[in-house]
Amino acid sequence: MHNHTTQTEKNLESAFAGESMANRKYLYFAKIARNLGAEEVAALFEETAHQETGHAFAHLELLYPPSQMTVEKILELAIEGELYETNQMYPEFERIAVEEGVQSAVSEFQEQAKESQEHAEIFIKAAKRFKALGMVERFHANRYIKALGAVQNKAADLEPKLQTNNSQPSGSETAA
Ligand SMILES: [Fe+2]
Ligand SMILES: [Fe+2]
C-alpha cells in the first residue's frame, strides 16, 4: 500500500490534484467557449488541458512509480479511493450540505456516492477475476512444469540406454 507521508509526497498529491483539476476545468471551459461561439478560445483551452494531463501524469509517476505497480496494486488503490468517496467523503459532504440547506449539492453528493460504490464493486469484481485468472495460469504453469519434469526424467532414464545402443557391438566401454 502506498502511504504518502512526507511533505514532498503531500505536495505531489496537491500538485497532481491541481493539474488534474486544471485539465477538467479547461475542458469544461472549452465547451462553454465553443457554445458561446469562441472557437479559437475553445481550442486554446483544449490544447492547454492536454498539457495539464501531462503535468498530472508526471506527478503520478513519482507518487506511484510504474516499476512498483502491479495489476493487483492499481486495482487495490482504485478500490480504496472509491470506498473512501462512498463511505467517508460524500456522506460528510452530504451532512454539511443538509446543514447548509443546499439541496442541489445534497442530491449530487448522494448520487455520486452511489456511483462511487458501483465503481468500487466493479473494481472488486475485476480484482477477483484477475486473481482467479492468475490461479488458473499458475495451475497451468505448474502442470506444464510437472509435465516438463516428467519428460526430462524420462529423457534422463533413456540416455544411458541410448548410449548403450549407440556403443560399438564389441562391447568396448571406451568412447570413440
Ligand atoms: Fe500545469
Ligand atoms: Fe468513481
Image (tube, rainbow, N blue to C red):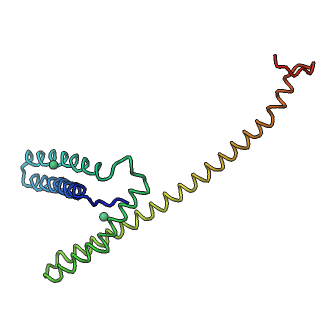
Q: Nearer the viewer, residue 108 or 58?
A: 58
Q: Position of residue 121 (x, y in %)?
A: 40, 67
Instruction: Decide if residue 38 is on the left or right side of residue 118.
Output: left
Q: Residue at x 75, y 40 (%)?
A: 153
Q: Residue furthest right?
A: 170
Give the quadrant of residue 103: bottom left
Q: Nearer the viewer, residue 17 or 46?
A: 17
Q: Residue at x 14, y 78 (%)?
A: 102
Q: Position of residue 25 (x, y in %)?
A: 15, 56
Give the quadrant of residue 112: bottom left
User: Which quadrant would the N terminus be assigned to in this image?
Assistant: bottom left
Q: Nearer the viewer, residue 131 or 7?
A: 7
Q: Position of residue 72 (x, y in %)?
A: 44, 57
Q: Residue at x 22, y 58 (%)?
A: 7
Q: Residue furthest top?
A: 176
Q: Is residue 90 above or below residue 72?
A: below
Instruction: Decide if residue 176 is on the left or right side of residue 110.
Output: right
Q: Position of residue 129 (x, y in %)?
A: 49, 60
Location of ligand 2 given as a quarter of the image: bottom left
Q: Is residue 127 above or below residue 176?
A: below
Q: How many numbered marks, from 0 up? A: 0
Q: Is residue 10 above or below residue 91?
A: above
User: Which quadrant would the C terminus be assigned to in this image?
Assistant: top right
Q: Residue at x 85, y 19 (%)?
A: 174
Give the quadrant of residue 22: bottom left
